[in-house]
Image (cartoon, rainbow, N blue to C red):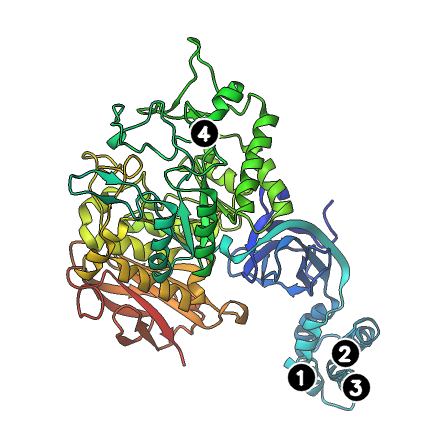
């Protein structure tokens, strides 16, 4: 039933409160609602957070939002992980109503004596009903005396009533008549890694792989891969993501470039999980042992890296599940088990699981597998193709794990339709792969940044991967090294979480064929021997630039947030401008970063850009300094500014050669 002071259209609320909105510890987010009433009397409203122990935190006053009629808003944040909630309390504010009416009537010489009498009675009632500190009470008591003193001039008595100090006390400690409470609405608060982090993906079998003089290749192992962790950490990454480390099937094993005629030395796809050596709870013998995996996790932790492990719920034809639980798969009319297909792609080396066959047995086994790796230090899982499994399965699994281990995070790798992608986020996935790869024009980028930062931010946390083993966009194929810097800059600055797949820093960009987004000689099917040190020594590596981007991210709290992104204007269709600003002390207040990116990897562009200074917390006529974190230059800026961005030369420390300006604002 509607409250006496109605509250409607509350945000953030996911599916009418069926699922919790999302936040992380310390993250500011906005709560809004339509709050109104009959007639013209004044009203007020607060947001009240309820912590996991059921304790209501101090209320946060709502104020008119800059958009919509009767829309009130407040910025709030939670300080601990767990299942929170929030309510909105609305009330009639008789003191504010009197102040509003008194200013009009007394100046019009209407009911002057009566208005002062009613005001004094209201303030006396305030003194009886409202709990406030002694200093604030003294302000109100002095006001009662002054406005009741008929020997004073009318204008003096009114000035006392409208004194800003008194008005501030009465606003902070209102009389709350006709109190209405709407909610509670659910909110889940995760650890900060659920929102922000820099991810790096590599295949352990390629790290430390080497070739003999005759060209024969030798696989890397978890031990040799651990040696690469120092370089990953030095680049400033927070998460090292591993594709499946389990035994790879022999039956229908794929050869190079996804061929059906493998050589005896071909290593197969890690996503074809399972062989005589075991299934999802085993480590591939070629990579080492479970003890080697534990050592890998320990070294990563010492370097400040978390290990994310791939969770791919599928099986090779020789996975132990195929023998022990054939009912978990789909049998075709000819008696064969159906392999995975995404026409025209065929995955003859993979059997998808049929979740309608023995759902309880499948659920129990998946939960066992996940908990097995949790015991071995994995607290982040990247889930392969979750959109091909039932939503109810994920909702149940993620609910159970969130209840017992709320620090365990799941990243959804679902390049699918928006409803399914968003539904996966709503039922519990902490992060999501996105359409970022396919957003390349200014209009596409601006629209998508607005979408992820505002429209879906209360339930879907984006992770902007610049490339994956499956996705090599044509922008990278034909844009040369500047294209790689452009995409890395957009991802690292535009999203609090972003990711890089190994080889990106070496500008690997050859597709298997024109029009394809698959890599030639894809690492999914073979070992990659990369000369990291040689590339860096010869200046052929993007690693220094990636390192610099991660340093900038760590230095600026504003870049570690999602909901604070604002798109600004540009007179050039190849120049995109956006900013991130932190305005409160809890989230690095006073930190403002403006990002200007040239989307054309081949040509310099110069233009005027136009900043929404109010969105940056600045006055409309403000002048301020901006410091370019890439070049080191400093300029004096205002609302309208000239920029020139030239990607055609060396990148850092030069007049030309930058794909972007990353500008920190100095307002002092």
In the displayed structure, 348 sits above or below 535; it is above
- Say which element carries label 4: strand
Q: CA distance from mark 2 to mark 1?
A: 12 Å
Task: Give residue 501's position: percent from left, percent from top.
Answer: 33, 47
Quarter of the image holding residue 139? bottom right
Foreground label between 4 and 3:
4
Q: CA distance from mark 2 to mark 3?
A: 11 Å
Task: Give residue 384's position: percent from left, percent from top.
Answer: 43, 37
Using the image, tell me which numbered label, if any, was put on residue 116. Answer: 2
The quarter in which the C terminus is drawn is: bottom left
Which numbered disc flags the more N-terminal residue, 1 or 4? 1
Which numbered disc flags the more N-terminal residue, 2 or 3? 2
Which numbered disc flags the more N-terminal residue, 4 or 2? 2
The residue wearing badge 3 is 145
Structural crowding at the residue carrying mark 1, measured as other residues with C-alpha within 10 Å and reported as few (<14), some (14–19) or many (≥20): some
- Of 347 and 62, the residue lying toward us: 347
Structural crowding at the residue carrying mark 2, measured as other residues with C-alpha within 10 Å and reported as few (<14), some (14–19) or many (≥20): many
Contact between labelled residues 4 and 1, with CB atoms less than 8 Å apart: no
Foreground label between 4 and 2:
4
Contact between labelled residues 3 and 2, with CB atoms less than 8 Å apart: no
Left or right of 427 in this view: 575: left
The residue wearing badge 1 is 159
The residue wearing badge 4 is 314
Residue 502 in sight: yes
Task: Give residue 386's position: percent from left, percent from top.
Answer: 47, 35
The quarter in which the N terminus is drawn is: top right
* Residue plotted at (31% across, 49% down): 443
């Amino acid at each position: 039933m509607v409250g006496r002071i109605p509250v409607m259209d509350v945000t953030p609320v996911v599916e009418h409160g069926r699922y919790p909105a999302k936040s992380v510890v310390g993250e500011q987010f906005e709560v809004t609602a339509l709050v109104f009433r009959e007639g013209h009397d004044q009203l007020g409203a607060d947001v009240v957070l309820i912590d996991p122990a059921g304790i209501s935190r101090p209320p946060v006053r709502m104020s008119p939002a800059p958009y919509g009629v009767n829309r009130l808003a407040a910025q709030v944040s939670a300080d601990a992980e767990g299942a929170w909630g929030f309510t909105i309390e609305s009330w009639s504010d008789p003191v504010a109503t009197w102040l509003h009416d008194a200013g009009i009537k007394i100046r019009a010489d209407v009911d002057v004596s009566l208005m002062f009498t009613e005001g004094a009675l209201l303030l006396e009632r305030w003194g009886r009903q409202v709990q406030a500190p002694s200093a604030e009470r003294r302000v109100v008591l002095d006001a009662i005396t002054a406005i009741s003193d008929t020997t004073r001039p009318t204008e003096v008595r009114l000035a006392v009533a409208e004194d800003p100090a008194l008005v501030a006390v009465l606003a902070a400690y209102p009389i709350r008549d006709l109190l209405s409470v709407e909610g509670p609405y659910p909110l889940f608060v995760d650890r900060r890694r659920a929102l922000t982090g820099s991810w790096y993906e590599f295949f352990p079998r390629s790290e430390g792989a080497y070739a003999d003089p005759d060209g024969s290749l030798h696989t890397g192992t978890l031990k040799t891969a651990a040696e690469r962790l120092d370089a990953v950490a030095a680049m400033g990454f927070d998460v090292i993501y591993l594709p499946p480390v389990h035994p790879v099937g022999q039956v229908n094993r794929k050869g190079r470039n996804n061929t059906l005629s493998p050589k005896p030395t071909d290593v197969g796809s890690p996503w074809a999980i399972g062989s005589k050596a075991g299934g999802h709870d085993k480590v591939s013998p070629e990579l080492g042992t479970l003890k080697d995996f534990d050592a890998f996790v320990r070294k990563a932790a010492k370097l400040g890296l978390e290990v994310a492990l791939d969770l791919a719920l599928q099986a090779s034809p020789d996975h132990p599940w195929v023998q022990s639980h054939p009912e978990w798969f789909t049998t075709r009319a000819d008696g064969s088990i159906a392999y995975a297909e995404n026409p025209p792609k065929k995955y003859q080396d993979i059997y998808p699981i049929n979740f309608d066959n023995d759902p309880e047995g499948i659920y129990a086994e998946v939960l066992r597998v996940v908990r097995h790796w949790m015991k071995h230090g994995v607290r982040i899982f990247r889930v392969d193709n979750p959109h091909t499994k039932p939503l109810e399965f994920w909702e149940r699994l993620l609910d159970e794990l969130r209840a017992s281990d709320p620090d365990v995070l799941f990243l959804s790798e679902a390049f699918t339709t928006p409803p399914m992608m968003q539904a996966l986020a709503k039922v519990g996935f902490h992060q999501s792969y996105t359409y970022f790869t396919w957003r390349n024009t200014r209009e596409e980028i601006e629209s998508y940044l607005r979408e992820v930062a505002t429209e879906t931010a209360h339930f879907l946390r984006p992770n902007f991967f610049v490339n994956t083993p499956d996705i090599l966009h044509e922008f990278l194929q034909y844009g040369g090294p500047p294209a790689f810097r452009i995409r890395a800059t957009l991802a690292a600055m535009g999203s609090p979480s972003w990711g890089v797949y190994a080889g990106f820093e070496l500008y690997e960009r050859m597709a298997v064929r024109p029009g394809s987004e698959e890599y030639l000689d894809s690492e999914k099917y073979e070992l990659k021997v990369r000369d990291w040190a040689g590339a860096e020594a010869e200046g052929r590596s993007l690693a220094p630039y990636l390192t610099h981007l991660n340093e900038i991210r760590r230095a600026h709290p504003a870049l570690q947030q999602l909901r604070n992104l604002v798109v600004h204007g540009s007179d050039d269709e190849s120049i995109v401008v956006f900013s991130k600003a932190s305005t409160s002390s809890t989230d690095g207040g006073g930190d403002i970063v403006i990002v200007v990116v040239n989307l054309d990897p081949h040509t310099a562009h110069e233009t005027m850009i136009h900043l929404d200074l109010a969105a940056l917390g600045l006055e409309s006529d403000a002048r301020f300094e901006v410091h370019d974190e890439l070049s080191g230059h400093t300029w004096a800026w205002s609302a309208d500014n000239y920029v020139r961005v030239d990607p055609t030369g060396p990148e850092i420390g030069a007049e030309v050669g930058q794909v972007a300006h990353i500008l920190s604002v100095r307002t002092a």
